[in-house]
Image (tube, grey):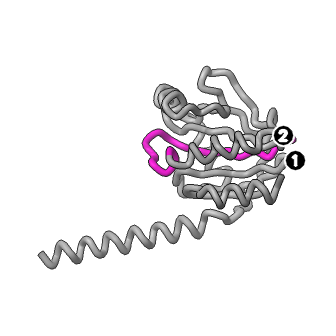
């Protein structure tokens, strides 16, 4: 019985350490993350190529997510709400699914996602690495200013207050 407690305690400590490590990476801008919007092009969920440059001029939150990632799904309602609140002020969200298209479509329909979704099943993970996420952890978000510069990087789930304050600081 005491060995089970020992293993449970070690597993808990490992989880806490991993959480602290991921959070330490969450807001760090890495040199490799200097990439411009016009360099990012992926298909939408219908297979049509889309460039993120079409949203230049807006404050743009690009969010990498997957259907099997609970924190990813938990933050989507926050994105929907803050997008609706700030759309007229020039805020946009673009989701990049690193899952297969059918699963992304099911999540889109079940959660009522009305912001643009792109298919990153093939290129999403390598794009995340180019954008500073070398761990491959999800969710991963990048905020681009109106000039198309990456200004904030987040590994892990946004809280509503955290994202709201971030948006307000750039609008």
| Relative depth, front residue between 83 and 101 | 83
Question: Residue at the location (49% across, 51% down)?
Answer: 71
Residue marked by disc 2: 56
Dot 1, how many residues are within 10 Å of its Cα: few (below 14), some (14-19), or many (20+)?
A: some
Q: Any magenta on residue 71?
A: yes
Specify which label sits upstream in the sequence, 1 or 2.
2
Could you tell me if residue 27 is visible in this image?
yes
> Does any portion of residue 125 appear in the rendered image?
no
Residue that badge 1 annotates = 147
Dot 1 and dot 2 residues touching (CB under 8 Å):
yes
Vertical placement of residue 128 versus 154, above or below: above
- Find residue 166 and report its horizontal and vertical position in percent: 73, 58
- Residue 74, percent across and down? 50, 48
The answer to which quarter of the image holds residue 113 is: top right
* Helix, strand or loop at mark 2: loop
Q: Residue at x 56, y 31 (%)?
A: 112
Residue 58 x/y as whole percent? 82, 42
Q: Is 18 drawn above or below residue 143 in the view shown?
A: below
Magenta highlight range: 57-73
Residue 1, placed above or below residue 145: below
Please identify the residue farthest to the left as the structure is shown.
Answer: 1
Q: Tell me, yes or no, whether the highlighted magenta stretch contains residue 158.
A: no
For the N terminus, the image quarter is: bottom left
Considering every residue shown, the one lying at the far front of the view is 85
Q: Which of the 4 quarters of the picture holds residue 158?
A: bottom right
Horizontal relation, residue 69 to residue 122: left or right:
left
């Amino acid at each position: 019985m005491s060995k089970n407690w020992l293993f449970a305690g070690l597993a808990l400590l490992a989880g806490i350490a991993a959480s602290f490590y991921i959070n330490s990476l969450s807001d760090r801008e890495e040199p490799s993350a200097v990439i411009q919007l016009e360099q990012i092009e992926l298909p939408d969920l219908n297979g049509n190529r889309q460039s993120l440059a079409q949203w230049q001029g807006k404050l743009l939150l690009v969010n990498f997510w997957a259907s099997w990632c609970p924190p990813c799904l938990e933050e989507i309602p926050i994105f929907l709400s803050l997008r609706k609140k700030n759309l007229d002020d020039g805020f946009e969200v673009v989701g990049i699914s690193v899952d297969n298209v059918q699963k992304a479509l099911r999540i889109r329909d079940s959660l009522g996602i009305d912001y643009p979704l792109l298919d990153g099943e093939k290129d999403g993970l390598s794009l995340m690495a180019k954008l500073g996420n070398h761990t491959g952890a999800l969710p991963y978000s990048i905020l681009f200013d109106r000039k198309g510069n990456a200004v904030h990087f987040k590994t892990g789930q946004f809280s509503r207050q955290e994202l709201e304050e971030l948006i307000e600081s750039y609008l």
